[in-house]
Image (cartoon, rainbow, N blue to C red):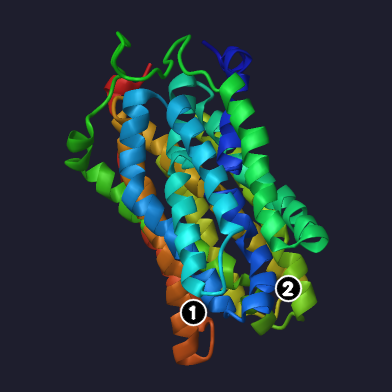
Amino acid sequence: MGQVEEFRRGWRLVLAAATGVGLGITGLTFYTLGIFIGPLTQEFGWSRTSLASATILTTLTTLLLGPLVGRLADRFGGRRVGLAGLVGLSAGLAGLSLIGAQLWTFYLAFGIAMVLGAGTLPIVWTRAVNAGFDKARGLALGLTLTGTGVCAILAPPYTQWLIAEHGWRTAYLGQAVLVLALGVPVVWLLFHEGGGKGAAGPAGAGAPAQPGFTARQARGMRQFWMLGVGFLFASFAVSALIVHLVSILSGRGLDRDTAVWVTSLLGFAIIAGRLGIGVLVDRFYGPAVAFLVLLVAGLACGLLLVGGGGVALAIVAVVLIGLAAGAEVDLVAYLASRYFGLRAYGEIYGWQLGFFALGAGLGPMGVGRLYDATGSYTAGLLAAGVGFLVGAALIGLMGRYPERFQD
């Protein structure tokens, strides 16, 4: 089956998967948390640092529940798990509208929303896309995960409008309605696993077993640990740079308004990275593509260290970082499917996403502490650069794909 035929048969699956990713806990809640910080700080007097720390709950959910969510998707199918996750997240967002004046009530409600919405993690959606596509797998995954980029562009204005017109409590209810009214119907109608070569159906019920390793077998392979640790280092670097980018650029000679404008290019670069990397891995050896992308991102850290290059140099650095940010999750999903097969893809990818989430959670905190200790982002940029280089080396040396999984 060629690429065109795969998309002709599977475009509905990709559209539904992209919707699920965009409206999930790594999309909607992550990219709009900052919109709520101002109103909550103004009403309750909570610090911005305290509110921003809620992202740790997303990291912990991914780290601790990712393998379980993947195992459930392997056993019962992604459609059931994804729908349950969307309904749960909608209930959790509605619960956030009821928090009180104590900070712990915000943490509790946000944590419950993350747990209830764990079924919306990318594990669920990429499992079906991996199984439904082969020749165009990279591009299909890129389109699927572009859902977070689209969310990053559209969700903040929607949320800000709700807050400005009706208040932050209504904004959380508006997000809950969005997930329930858009996400659930789209996934219900279009996200169908099975039917066609490599289709991903739930285990059991007479469904043929998918080729690949068990999760236990995969954990005994060096590629499992090279992939996980490699992207732990890479996600450490990317997340640290994204969170601190405005401050980094401001400290390198740009005024804050210009720094914010340049940083806004990240969203478009992330989308370009998702699609571009998807096309490349369909045509070239995946670890080599990952090596080059991460190596170039490391060079971007060097550009930011040099400073004094004005807006043009800053734009180049931001675009390179955005391309790497767009490529990361796609590459994890793609390489996991190529090295370990689809037999236990959900559980295996859950572990890999846990490595990724751990790095993403540690990055901003680590670079922030380096800044507090030195009064400069120089050490943080060096740490990010090392993270990219270590990640590139580990992933680039993973070796050939197992022959049994190739057509």
* Residue that label 1 marks: 368
- Spatial distance from mark 2 to mark 1, Cα to Cα? 18 Å
Q: Amino acid at mark 1?
A: Gly
* Residue that label 2 marks: 259
Q: Residue furthest right?
A: 165
Up/down of 404 relative to 55, above or below: above
**From the viewer's perspective, is 399 left or right of 167?**
left
Up/down of 281 relative to 55, above or below: above
- The numbered disc on residue 352 is none
**From the viewer's perspective, is 246 left or right of 398?**
right
What SS does tag 2 mark?
helix
The residue lying at 23 percent from left, 28 percent from top is 213
Relative depth, front residue between 270 and 48: 48
The residue lying at 26 percent from left, 49 percent from top is 225
Relative depth, front residue between 172 and 245: 172
Relative depth, front residue between 11 and 407: 11
Residue 297 visible to the viewer: yes
Camera-near label (2 vs 1) is 1
Pinpoint residue 333: horizontal percent, then vertical percent. 43, 38
Pinpoint residue 131: horizontal percent, then vertical percent. 43, 22
Pinpoint residue 223: horizontal percent, then vertical percent. 27, 43
The crowding category of the residue bearing disc 1, from other C-alpha atoms within 10 Å (few below 14, some 14 to 19, many at least 20), is: some
Q: Amino acid at mark 2?
A: Ala
The residue lying at 78 percent from left, 73 percent from top is 258
* Count of numbered labels shown in the rendering: 2
